Every structure is written in structure tokens, then in C-alpha cells.
Amino acid sequence: MLTEKNIYKPVMAKLTEVIEESPLIKTFVLIPEKEFSFRTGQFIELSVDGIGEAPFTPSSSPLITEKLEVTVMKTGYVTEHMHKLKPGINMGIRGPFGRGYPVEMFYGKEVLILGGGCGLAPIRSLLYALEGVKDKLKKVILCYGSKTPADCIYKPLFDRLNKTEKFEAYRTVDRADEEWDGSVGVVTTLLNKIKITIDESVAIVCGPPVMMKFGTIRLLEMGYKDEQIYLSMEKNMSCGLGKCGHCMMGEFFVCKDGPVFTYNELKGTPDIWK
Amino acid sequence: MKVTRDVLKKIRFFDNYTEKQLDIIAKLSNIKEFRVKQVLFEQYDELSDISVLLEGTLSMGISLAGEKRIHLGTIEEGQLFSWSAVFSPFISTAWVMSVTPAKILSIDAKKLNKEIEKDCDFGLKTMSKIAQTISHRLGDTRFQLMNQLTL
Amino acid sequence: MQYKCIPKEEWDKTLEQLLLSFTIFAVVKNEFGQDYELIRPEDIPGISYNKPKPATSLKNFFLPVRENVTSERSDGKKRVIIGVPNCDIEGLSLLDEIYLDNEYDDIFYSKRRENTILISSDCFGIQEHCHCMSYGILPYSVRGADLAVINLDETIILRINTPQGEDFANIFPAIRLVEDKSIIDKIEQKQRATEKLLETSNLNLPDYKTTGELVTRAEVDIWEKYSRQCVSCGACTTICPTCTCFLLIDKPGFEKVKQMDACQYPGFERVAGGEDVLFELHNRFRNRYMCKYSWKPGKFRSTACTGCGRCIEACIGKINKNELFRELSKQPVC
């Protein structure tokens, strides 16, 4: 009977490495038992044996299919158990699910990425994907803000991007510490210093709901049209299949119709920033 | 350094001013240079100039009992600051310090206000730009506050 | 569409023989009213026909309350369910759209659907809260069910809607084509009578689309008023033919158990960080109506409410959604 594809059954993946990014954030390196491909921006349901599963957007390059990296912040029951795991054990993966970033739609354009907090995880995957097609892009600008310098994950990423042709990366923090000598202020303040041709660009916003709301407002003020702004909505995704009803946002199933939406699609839906 | 209409035309802040209006501002302006870690003014200082950062980076913040320098924001090239010079009681709400060597355009606020009274179009344009800067700064500050209060 | 007939005695006799090769469920009277029961030979003469409606819907035949969705299972005997009211048949249409969406077919649901022959039963009469016609659903099935059964003067008449229904009907050796047109007229008369009863009992009830508009526009005070009696027991969602939200629970060995859930339960929308957009009771209450009348219609062709009225019957707090809708429809539009 189960020779047909069972949508509920996870694929096994071996946890080979656990990287500590910050006190609350770890990156898990997984080798799935068979090649696993995804579009950047899609998510997976990652399960801990007998404990539970949770949705994550992989932070690794979609061009690499033998391994997968998932960055996990410790916030609840399942993630707390995940943080206790040691390399060598198996985890379960279902997916990939949903609509990812339509990278082909960015060809010939300037790409502005506004990221905050843990939103840098899916953004890193997007940046790898964009690097792979950088000949087709005009330029890529990353503006990223974290609460404090310690909260910024993937610190080496910024230097590397600034050394890559067509890429620029800027960082800011809400609250500085004594060593910090970079920009201070919320991520939208970085928009004051970048040079971008709005009509020939797309804007991608990814981060906590507060940041996505303020970021979108500022982008619209700058002159971006609703259809130029791409948002990655994190909702209570559970089955990933458009069936269990937990991720419904108005008439959308975030797990199927998203998680990537344009602001044009969402602007009529109430409570999207909650 | 002498400020001319052509110097102002290169600054994004003065985008939609007429040539005549640029001449007026040029007459009221001065360019000042600062070294690294120089204090431009302290919180509660009386201000006489409204400024635009031309080159470099400045940091701004407030002082609280026990801590003189709480760093709250960064001023980037092209941004307006020290607007309190235009409005009574002309007292600064924050300290500003240079992070890198910096060049600023300083405009005499008292004389600017006189020009604003004389020419309504110029006044509206200038006040709108100042209001927009303050509005953005307020929006960003609320966002910064929300970030501290939420997870 | 064809009509065939068989004397009730012959129908009952053949059904008994069929018990060897099919699992049969039918609507049977019980101390509380009537409901689906697993049929044994002695239950066959007592099967209830044409009286609305069984207390529970078809939902749990296709979506069990708890189910292990990672374990192997054998197919089992084919199933026949007799006496399904058309509201439940139509409710299955939404379930098909959700669970058999081509991209992610639920194989457990799909196998159960293939394995089940549905025999609908025309409703001759109504119950207090029936309002199927207000939402465009007839009290008798002309599609959706393989067959419809009518018990008329000790003769079983079958209306055959699909080839699978035709095959099933032909299992009965004593089956004949209906030649007497007056029989069909009698059936149609009874159908008209039921329709009239529904029209009278549901006067002033807004239709499905209008209800969606009213619910979307409604202010918070009406939700607070009607949810005052609500205790979040979830009875409405459990009994509803079209409410199918579920949880996936992890068991050791990466097994997963799919268990029915309800948006009425506190914590339905609670996320790991602790935030819960449906924390307040009146918001959870409103959420269900928005989902059924405004959001699902934007996404699916099938109706998300079949007008069966079971939510009104099941509610511990005696909340009547039709009262709510009637009140909304009387409010002035400003």
C-alpha cells in the first residue's frame, strides 16, 4: 500500500555537525538518506524522534543536494530538544514545501534584501542562490539588523559578500556594546545609505513580524510598488500540505500559497503582522 | 570653505530647490570638518546651526545618570541633523560625535528662519524636509523600542 | 440517471448475503434518535430510510479521529454506507478538494474513498435545524452518491447516479427497471414537500455568499455577544462534516499520528515563542465563521457549510449560528 508516496512519512537525515552561532542559535548540518533538492525560500518540517516537528527554511545553498543546513533558534519545546542533540543521530525531514523565492523574476534587476534577527538564515540560502546567477543580476544589497552585535549570526558572511562582485552588505545593531564601531539603529536606517534604482529593483524582507511591518512601510514610502516587495511569512506551519488548517492566514494557506508572498497579494488580508 | 549653488546641487537633501533658493541657502552655509571621535555637540547644548552630513559617519545618542554615551543611532551621509536649532527652545535632544573624519554642511538657523518667513514656498519646502526627517527618525525609534519590548 | 426497484424483502435478503464480502454501515434508530451503525444480519430489517438525519456525519469514515499515518495497513473489505443524507454527500466534496489535491494526495483518505460505496437516502421530512437549501444543497442526491435509496410502500427504489452505483445495483438478482412512471412522480412529490418545509423553516436566513459578506463586515460586539455562552468544547468542529483541521503528533521511531484538532481549542494558533493570535475566546469564535463563510469560499469550489445544522444541535452553550446570521442580516448597512 505504501509504495505510493506517503505525504506524512519523513525522509531520514543524519545529523553530522552542530555549529553554535550564538547562545540561542545553532546550525544543524544534515545528510539526507537520498538527494534532497529545494528552491530557496521553501521550508521543511524537521522532526526529532518521538518529540515533534517544526518548520524551518534551510539556510544552505539550494545548489547543493547531498547536504542541508538548518539554523534553529531555541524558542519552545521541540527546538529545546533539538538543541540537546549530538551529531550521529537521525532526524526526519518532510518537504520541501511551499512557494520559494522566484529567483528568475529577479534577473536583470537590482535586489535589495532587508533582513532582521533569525531571518538571516533563509536569506543566506537566497544569497547563495543569487551568487549562482549573479551574471544575470545588476547588483545585490543586503541590509541586516540584529538587536545586539552578539545576536548576529554568520558574522563572516558580511566580509565575504563585500568582497564579491556585485554584492554589498551592511549591518546595524539596535543596541551597541563597547566594541561595536558600526552603524547603530534599526535596519530601516540602513536604507538611508544605500544607492538603488527603485524602478529597476525588487525588495525582499525577511525577519521578525515587527521588522517586516516597519520594513514594508519604509519601502512603500521610498516608492516601491506592492508587487515589488517579497515577504517571507512565518506562520504556525504544521502539516506543510495545505490540510491541517493551522497556518491559515485569511484565505491563504501559508504552507502552500507561501511562505513567500508579494505585498500585493497580502495587503487585503487582515492581521498579517501578528 | 565657500559654499556655492553647485556644491548644494550635489547633495540629495537639496533635490527640488530652485536655483534662487539654493543661492539663499549657500549664503547662510559653511562647511566644517571634524577629526575622529570629536564631539560636535552635547545633549542639551544650545544649537545655532542645522546641519547635513556630507562625508563620513557620525554617531548620536543620549546621556543618562551614570552613563554619558548611550549610542542610539548612526547618521549617514546626506542625512539632516541638529534640526532643534530651527525650533524653540533650540536645545539639542542628543549628543553627536564623529566616528570617522567628517565633513558637514552647517546652515545658520536664525537666518534660515528669517528667509522662511519671507518666502512661503521656500518655507514649506524646507519645513517639509525637516518634518520628514523627524518623522522617519520617530518611526525608526518606535521600531527600535518595539524590538526591545518583544521577543 | 435511472430508477430501478426491488421488493424490500429481496433487498434485505441480498444485503444479508453481501455481509460476507462487504462491511456495511447504515442508519439505524437508537435511544437518542438515529445514527450510523455497523450492520449485522439482525439489524437489516430495522435500517432507517428517508428520515433525516444521522447524528454524526460521514467525516469520521474517511478521516478517523486518530490515525497512524506512517504505518502499513492492508486494504480490507470494501465498505457500503447506506442512508447518507445529501448534506453529508456534499460535505465530502470539500474534503476531496483538500485531501485529494493532486500535489499532495492523502493516500489513506484516497484509499478509503475508493473503497467505499455511498448510498444516499432522500430526505422526506426535515429536522428542526436543517437548512441545506439555504446554501444551495438539495435534500436528495442526484450526483456525488453512487446511488440514492427510497423506501416506498415496502419497495426499495434505487436512483442510480454513477457506473459504480450501477454495478452495485446489479448485484441484486431481483432488481428491475422502474417502468411505472407514477412511482417516480410520487418520489418527486415527496421531494417537493421536503423542499417546501425547508423554505418555510428557513425564511429570512441569508444565503451562503451573503452570509460570507455579513460575517466579514460584522463588528466585534456581535462576536462577544454570541460567544458569551461558548466554553471552547469544540463540539461544533467535531460534529461538523467539513471541519477537518488536525495535529501531527510524533511518536518514537519517527511514526506520526494524525489527530483531529479544532480551532476552538485554546492554543490552536499558539507558536513556540508563546504568542497566540486567537488567545481571546471571541476571536476564536469569529475565526470559525470567517473560515467557513469567507476564507474557504475564496479558495475552494465546494461549500464549507452544508446547512446540516448539527453544530446547533451539538452546542453545549445552545449557541445557534442561524440566529446570529439573521441578526446580522437585519443590521443596517452604514
Image (spheres, coloured by chain):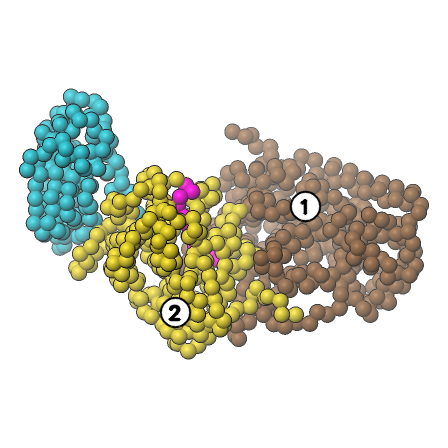
Task: Report the chain holding disc 2.
Answer: A
The amino acid type, in three-letter code, at marker 1 is Gly
Among the chains pictured, the one given brown colouring is C
What residue span does the magenta drawing correspond to? A226-237
Among the chains pictured, the one given cyan colouring is B
Residue B19 versus residue A98: which sits nearer the camera? B19
The image shows residue C253 at horizontal and vertical percentages of 53, 75
Which numbered disc covers residue B46? none
The image shows residue B76 at horizontal and vertical percentages of 20, 46
Instruction: From the image, tell me which residue sits under label 2.
Output: A28
Q: Are marks 2 and 1 on the same chain?
A: no
Query: At 42% across and 52% down in the image, what residue appears?
Result: A103
Disc 2 and disc 1 in contact, CB within 8 angstroms: no
Which numbered disc covers residue C307? 1
Q: Say if the magenta span includes residue C323.
A: no
The amino acid type, in three-letter code, at marker 2 is Phe
Query: At 84% across and 59% down in the image, what residue appears?
Result: C46
What secondary structure is marked by label 2? strand
The image shows residue A191 at horizontal and vertical percentages of 28, 46
Q: Residues within 10 Å of mark 1 (few under 14, many from 20)?
A: many
Residue lying at the far bottom of the rendered structure: A88
Q: Is residue C124 above or below residue C8?
A: above
For marks 2 and 1, give the CA distance. Answer: 49 Å
In the displayed structure image, the side of residue B73 where residue C273 appears, left or right: right
Among the chains pictured, the one given yellow colouring is A
